[in-house]
Amino acid sequence: MECSTQWGTVLAVRSGAGRQELEVRLGAATAKALNYPEMTGACQVGDRVLLNTTAVNLRLGTGGWHYVLAVEGRERSLSSRKGHIMKLRYTPLQGRVLAVEEPDSPYHEAVAQAEELAALPVAVGSLHSMLAPVAWLLARNCPRKRLVYLMSDGAALPLALSDTAAQLKEQGLIAATITFGHAFGGDWEAVNIYSALLAAKYAAQADLAVVLMGPGVVGTGTTWGTTAIEQGVFLNAVHHLGGFPVAIPRLSQGDGRDRHRGLSHHTLTVLRRVVRDPVFLPLPNCFRGFPRWEEQLQDLPHHIVWEETEEAFQELLRAEFPFFTMGRGLQEDPLFFHGVAAAALFLCRQLA
């Protein structure tokens, strides 16, 4: 694995929730960089910083950001944290966290003794862009219910990268966050999807939960070479623990790639070849007017539930919140948001 690094000097700092956005001088040029203070310590103007420039050099979809690896002359801050569970294990950036299930956690006994989710509704999707519309619609249609967001390590590892999660938390649209696997930065840390689900129920006191990766997704244009496959693994885990599993469909009419039009091939692979037992698949009525919809749904061994989503979609249009997926907004890819709305409305009916 090749990594490109370069030293730069901090020219400006803007601090946000769990991260700093920097303007950095690199030789004669300037560039943007992200710093996570819990990993490297806080940056100040004039600091010399070592940057990982790999993604920008490769023109990957990172928003044009470099990432701070170290601040010259300053020790990393993670070593001062509590806990004995290492994330980013056996890398130079490994750090300790207090996992919700470990013996020093005040929730250790509750999570250790828990064996099942008691039919907790759990929605599982495949893109971070599903989080904002599902949380917004749940808050509007079933208020005063505690929604807990579980972030996997299928894409971005730091929760702090997500402006969406920070805004939803600030507005009270999600009650708590749990990061599991090598993802980090949630209100609770967990070792894997099973302990994260139990933590949602018995530590965070969730009325319902949503499991999604952070910003970004890994894909190769092949059937199996994508982190979106995790959706099936997580739906199986919900089944194993006695939860109420709901698959959020990835739909699109605006994606230029044929494999993602209608019901995405990722969702179909998950539902046909990964999920072991039937789950609930809410779909919007408007999908019935889309080409090939019957072919795509043929012989799916799951509980398909049709939802009328036009009113919910109009609510999203009126909302003062930025809803986007793959750079497309509500008007550019309405079918995507109708699909998320179907899942949100179905979940609300389970809580009635």
Image (spheres, rainbow, N blue to C red):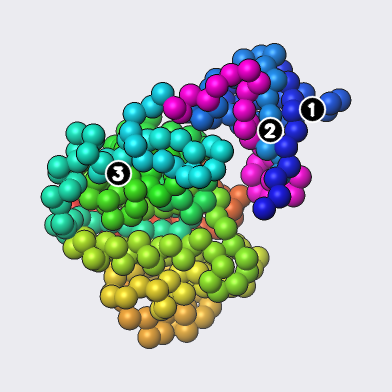
Circle 1 sits in a helix, a strand or a loop, which is it? Answer: strand
The magenta span reads 55-79
- Whole-angstrom CA distance, mark 3 to mark 1, is 41 Å
Q: Residues within 10 Å of mark 1 (few under 14, many from 20)?
A: some
Q: Residues within 10 Å of mark 2 (few under 14, many from 20)?
A: many
Label for residue 51? 2
Q: Are marks 2 and 1 in contact (CB under 8 Å)?
A: yes
Residue at 30% in and 49% down: 196
Foreground label between 3 and 1 = 1
Q: Which residue is mark 1?
A: 26
Position of 333 relative to 93 (above/below):
below
Q: Name the spot of residue 67 as percent of width and height, x first.
A: 63, 35
Amino acid beneath label 3: Val
Q: Residues within 10 Å of mark 3 (few under 14, many from 20)?
A: many
Position of 225 relative to 179 (above/below):
below
Residue at 42% in and 78% down: 273
Q: Name the spot of residue 137 as percent of width and height, x first.
A: 34, 47
Foreground label between 2 and 3 = 2
> Is residue 169 or residue 161 the one in the foreground?
161
Query: Is residue 347 found inside the magenta-colored segment of the image?
Result: no
Circle 2 sits in a helix, a strand or a loop, which is it? Answer: strand
> Is residue 140 or residue 135 the one in the foreground?
135
Circle 3 sits in a helix, a strand or a loop, which is it? Answer: strand
Label for residue 197? none
Position of 45 relative to 62 (above/below):
above
Q: For residue 93, what is the image quadrant?
A: top right
The reply to whether residue 134 is visible in this rendering is no
Q: Name the spot of residue 281 as percent of width and height, x first.
A: 34, 69
Q: Which residue is mark 3?
A: 148
Query: In this rendering, would 340 be left or right of 62?
Result: left
